[in-house]
Image (cartoon, rainbow, N blue to C red):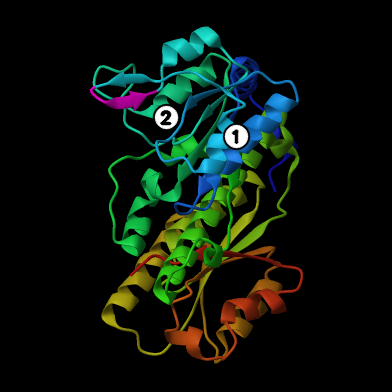
Amino acid sequence: MPDTEHRRPSPEQLLQQVEAEQRRATQGRLKIFLGYAGGVGKSLRMFDEGRRRRSRGEDVAVAATQSTEPAVVEQLLTGLEVIPPRVMDGIYAIDVEAVLRRHPQVCLIDGLAYRNPPGSRHAERWQDVEDLLASGISVVTSINLQYVKERQRQVEAIRGKKVQDSVPEAFIRAADEIELVDVPPEYCGPGNDAQQRELSQLREIALVLAADVVDHQLETYLRRQGIEQLYGTQERILVCITPRSNASAMIRRGRRLADLFYGDLYAVYVQQGVLSAPDQSMIEQNLATANEAAAYVEILHGEDPIESILQYAYRNGITQIFVGHSQQDNRGWLSRWKANPVERLIMESEGIDVRIFPTEAA
């Protein structure tokens, strides 16, 4: 555990905290409604929040709508002030100068991931939002998972479609609040089993992204308040590695949380039978990634992988277990029980939090 002197903020850190507080005092707040697919209702939720804020006396204006808003959204818009967009070469864009002149308390922007026409103030709409926030205007906006740049490869592998527009994940992480419009896949409209599986996979990725944002918010808050300086070694995070697990994401998140709480990071792989050459290569790569992250790495042996993981967890005082899972993955040791092994891990890990990460699409 770090000693008290080591945990005391340096003058440079204190100055950074003061400067961050000053920026925060004058900057608008950003709230994002995240949808994992079209039709989950993120626009409706966003404009309904605008209506409720206006009813509470906040000064609300709309700076961007989408051309295909459903009728129920159109009804919400009738009670809200809309700042007309700029139109260049038939392309609609936020009139940033008009919004800055009007300077509402809250600006609603439906569709964060749009490119602006040539000659605009910025190339991307999310950059326009940065200007509004810097001027002290709070922004409530919406985005679909497929437009988050760092998640696009996963989403494209699932959907089989590629989109051109994108918003960097760092911008999403910087949000003051994120709300996942979490409608179960079966309620997103009629579809066959394959479509429902795709929606479930997209939902899992969106849940992980939302959790990442919450982790970032917690980390920012603790640093701003100086609370992180008071923590000792409390969190012990265990990453379970398999050939199919998204180990890099789990290790990255585990390392960040372990550092935040002066905790420890562990990684285990339960030895299986003979693996294919690609799977063996992936295991070696994942173990190397864990070693690079300064995790305590161990290879376990046992007929029952879940029992082996839990025995290791209790022996080492683990507080959180990170595990990868895909609804389509029934290979390897995941097929040894009729019950879903991840569900079994959750049920039997008394006193330990289990966090599930979607596996990389094959």
- Identified by mark 1, the residue type is Leu
Whether residue 243 appears in this view of the structure is: no
Residue 61 in the figure: left or right of residue 146: right
Q: Nearer the viewer, mark 2 or mark 1?
A: 1
State the image coordinates of residue 223 (x, y, percent, origin top left).
65, 33
Alpha carbon distance from label 2 to label 1: 24 Å
Q: Which mark is residue 76?
A: 1
SS class, disc 1: helix
Q: Quadrant of residue 277?
A: bottom left
In this rendering, the answer to whether 196 lies above or below 25 is below
- Identified by mark 2, the residue type is Trp
Q: Quadrant of residue 231?
A: top right
Q: Which mark is residue 126?
A: 2
State the image coordinates of residue 29 (x, y, percent, origin top left).
60, 26
Nearest to N terminus: mark 2 or mark 1: 1
State the image coordinates of residue 255 (x, y, percent, origin top left).
54, 52
Mark 2 crowd level (few <14, some 14–19, many ≥20, 10 Å Cα): many
Q: What residue sits 72% from the left and 54% below the top?
A: 234
In this rendering, the answer to whether 160 lies above or below 19 is below
Magenta segment main secondary structure: strand
Q: What residue sits 54% from the left and 48% below the top?
A: 41
Residue 347 in the figure: left or right of residue 240: right
Residues rendered magenta in the picture: 89-93
Judging depth in this view, the residue of 111 and 214 nearest the camera is 111
Residue 317 in the figure: left or right of residue 237: right
Q: What residue sits 47% from the left and 54% below the top?
A: 293
State the image coordinates of residue 183 (x, y, percent, origin top left).
58, 58
Whether residue 233 appears in this view of the structure is: yes
Q: Quadrant of the C terminus?
A: bottom left
Magenta segment includes 64: no
SS class, disc 2: helix
Q: Quadrant of residue 102?
A: top right
